[in-house]
Image (cartoon, rainbow, N blue to C red):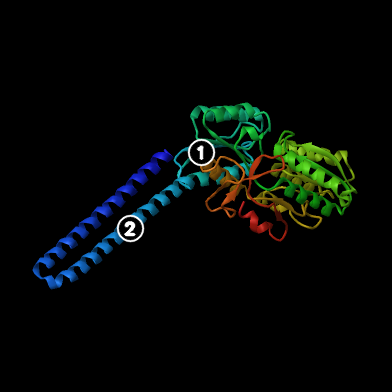
Amino acid sequence: MKRQVVSVMLTAAMAAGMMAGCGSSTAATSSASSAAASSSTAAASSSAAEESSSSEAATSSSATETAEASSAEEVKSSSAAASTGKADGTYALVPKSAGNPFNEREADGFTEAVKAMGGTPVVSYPDSATADAQITVIQSLISQGVDSIAVAANDANALSAVLQQAKDAGIAVCTLDSDVAAADRAVFCNQAGVQEIGQALMDAVLDISGGEGQYAILSATSQATNQNAWIDAMKQIAASDDKYSKLELVEVAYGDDEPQKSTDQTQALLTKYPDLKVICSPTTVGIAAAAKVLQDQGSSVKLTGLGLPSEMKEYIGDDDAHSCPYMFLWNPIDLGKLAGYTSIALANGTITGAEGETFEAGDLEGSPYTITKNSDGATEIILGQPFKFDPSNIEEWAQVY
């Protein structure tokens, strides 16, 4: 359809140019006839008539060139609009799970971006936070013949076969929040760099613990690629610098991004490790569950991680009455928007997912975005840096998301 639209615009522009040229030719002919009539009346005025004719012809030629230039600009403008802009296809988002506020806000951003570009958004939640549930959803989307699928993967490898089916069917595939193998998608929409997140979280543990003691990590699922990447980065950072040498990671627990299981896992950590000083939860479901347990029990164990301001407002504080001194996150609405714009750019051929490609992403602060390579050699688009939420700004941001 994109090529048809551009073809129609090119034809219209060429026709406009030819019409302008014909009009100018008629004016030149009329001027020449007038000059000839003047010449036959008086030889003395012949020279003046010729000068007038030359002037009219020059004016006519200039008008023609102006019209042709205008037509060329119209063609150029039309081409640019097609390469970055409107899309009337159907673009699907497959979040990790339903009932997760972070995923819901991602979906809000995705829907907003796709609608702004003239497309039809489809948000399909899996029945549970598992790869099998996502496979069922993706198979349904393939049958529907959507133009693209953006997925926040519950498993890095288990979705490989179904995503290859989608690609074989001509559907553009990208990921957001949690990635899959590079061969199974075109590009990953990354909320922030893995190292940057790992560094922020490890430094928070160091700071809140006072530089020594036991800490634990409360993650989502054991297969969640984003969680595992951030946790691996934390471990590598801790091992690479002596300033973390007095910290002891006692356990990585998994709450499967379920509120009740995350609550149970938090309680288990408190029971198993009486000397525990800090829990780091790089998942919005886990950190909210842990914050409530710690604060309700008046525990001396403190918390940090990645959380939604609106859910964590009552737990953020730098005194004994609050369980979480500070935390980090990014805007999930913007992450959803980035996935929406990326989906459209992939589907209409503006980008392929190759390193170095650049594309516009609506009103996002980082637009235009450039595709880069991550540490594994796969390509990604980084939304921005992790942002710190503390008592000085939590009230303000809780009103945003």
Q: Give the distance between the C-alpha atoms of the residues marked 1 and 2, in whole angstroms.
A: 37 Å
Residue drawn 60% across the image and 27% down it: 162
Q: Quadrant of residue 57?
A: bottom left
Tell me what residue is drawn at x 62 percent, y 29 percent. Answer: 133
Q: Secondary structure at mark 1?
A: helix
Residue 6 placement, left or right of 104: left
Q: Position of residue 41 (x, y in %)?
A: 9, 68
Query: 38 or 379, which lies in front?
Result: 38
Position of residue 29 measured from the top left corner of the image (x, y, whole percent): 19, 58
Labelled disc at residue 347: 1
Q: Which one is in front, 92 or 250? A: 92
Looking at the image, residue 309 lies above or below residue 354: below
Any part of residue 384 in sight: yes
Which mark is in front, 1 or 2?
2
Image coords of residue 222 (percent x, y): 74, 34
Of labels 1 and 2, earlier in sequence is 2
Which residue is farthest front? 43
Q: Residue at x 14, y 63 (%)?
A: 36
Residue 40 percent coordinates (x, y): 10, 66
Q: Nearer the viewer, residue 108 or 302?
A: 108
Query: For the N terminus, which image quadrant?
Result: top left
| Residue kind at label 1, given as amino acid type | Ala
Q: Residues within 10 Å of mark 2 (few under 14, many from 20)?
A: some
Numbered circle sitting on residue 325: none
Whether residue 58 sits left or right of residue 109 in the image: it is left
Drawn side of residue 230 relative to residue 58, left or right = right
Figure check: 30 above or below 191: below
> Disc 2 designates what residue?
65
Give 251 or 314, whichever is nearer the viewer: 251
In the rendered image, the vertical position of residue 168 relative to residue 197, given as above or below: above
**In this rendering, does residue 258 appear at all?**
no
Q: Tell me which corner region of the image, top left, top right, bottom left or bottom right, holds residue 326.
A: bottom right
